[in-house]
Amino acid sequence: MNTPNYWYWNNYFTKKEIIELNKIIEKEGKELETENEIARDLNNNNIKFSKVKSILHYKIKDKLKSLINDIKYVNQENYGYNIFEMNDKQYHNLNIYSSKINGKYDWHTDKSKNPLTDIKFTILINVSLKDYEGGNFELFDNGIFKIKELNTSGNIIMIKSYMNHRVLPVLKGERRTLALFIKGAKFV
């Protein structure tokens, strides 16, 4: 489904599929973002408070095959970006925002560190295993948009990666999202 600022799919993954994804990532993933790698603002302040586990695409690609095809179709019909095929060596990030650490991610955009490519889309899949409170996702585009569609486990949103976005603090429980970054040729 489409809105002016993002694309979303409701109930894309079942509870069983969410449990399977979490099990694979917990078993096969590696902890990411040490203190030296954590997201920071221009003043070198930490802007992300979460645990991150990364997993290579090939380890979960069978679970994502249909979604990747849907992303390509939505891009083709609505955006027309030049995007690359998902590479088996590409990483996806499981972001775990816990109320125990006031988990949140302040305003940011997603960018490539490679001078030859850009991240075209950020895909966020809510893979939370239990209910939680807070942790709402917001976009900024001439004002703040509260993206309620991402509040439900199994739902997915797709945003243009250069759009400012944030995750508000988780107040109770644990919010889990799997982030996929769709890359393509450099914007010119």
Image (cartoon, rainbow, N blue to C red):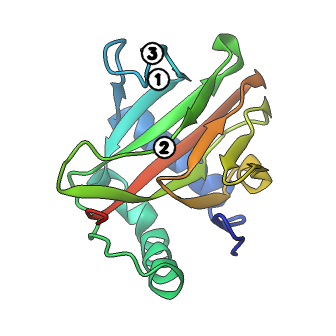
**What residue is disc 2 on?**
109
- Of 144 and 65, nearer the camera is 144
The amino acid pointed to by label 3 is Asn
Disc 1, disc 3: CB below 8 Å? yes
Pointer 3: residues within 10 angstroms few (<14), some, or many (20+)?
few
The answer to which of 68 and 160 lies nearer the viewer is 160
The mark that comes first in sequence, 3 or 2, is 3
**SS state under label 3:** loop
Residue at x 63% of width, y 26% of height:
104
Whether residue 39 sits left or right of residue 112 in the image: it is: right
Q: Secondary structure at mark 2?
A: loop
Classify the position of the N terminus by image quarter. bottom right
Q: How many marks?
A: 3
Above or below, comparing residue 97 to residue 122 in the picture: above
Residue 8 is tagged as none
First in residue order: circle 2 vs circle 1 = 1
Q: Would you call the spot at circle 2 few (<14 residues within 10 Å), some (14-19), or many (20 or more)?
A: some
In what element is the residue under mark 1?
Answer: loop
Q: Quadrant of the C terminus?
A: bottom left
For the point 47% across and 53% down, the residue is 162
Label 2 to label 1, Cα distance in Å? 11 Å
Question: Mark 3 sits on what residue?
Answer: 43
Q: Percent position (x, y) of residue 183?
A: 32, 60
Residue pictured at 71% horizontal, 31% vertical: 168
- Considering only vertical position in the picture, is 6 above or below 107? below
Q: Rounded to the nearest whole Å, what is the CA distance between mark 3 and mark 2? A: 16 Å
Residue, disc 1: 41
Give coordinates of residue 56: x percent, y percent: 28, 46
Between the residue at mark 1 and the residue at mark 3, the CA separation in whole angstroms equals 5 Å
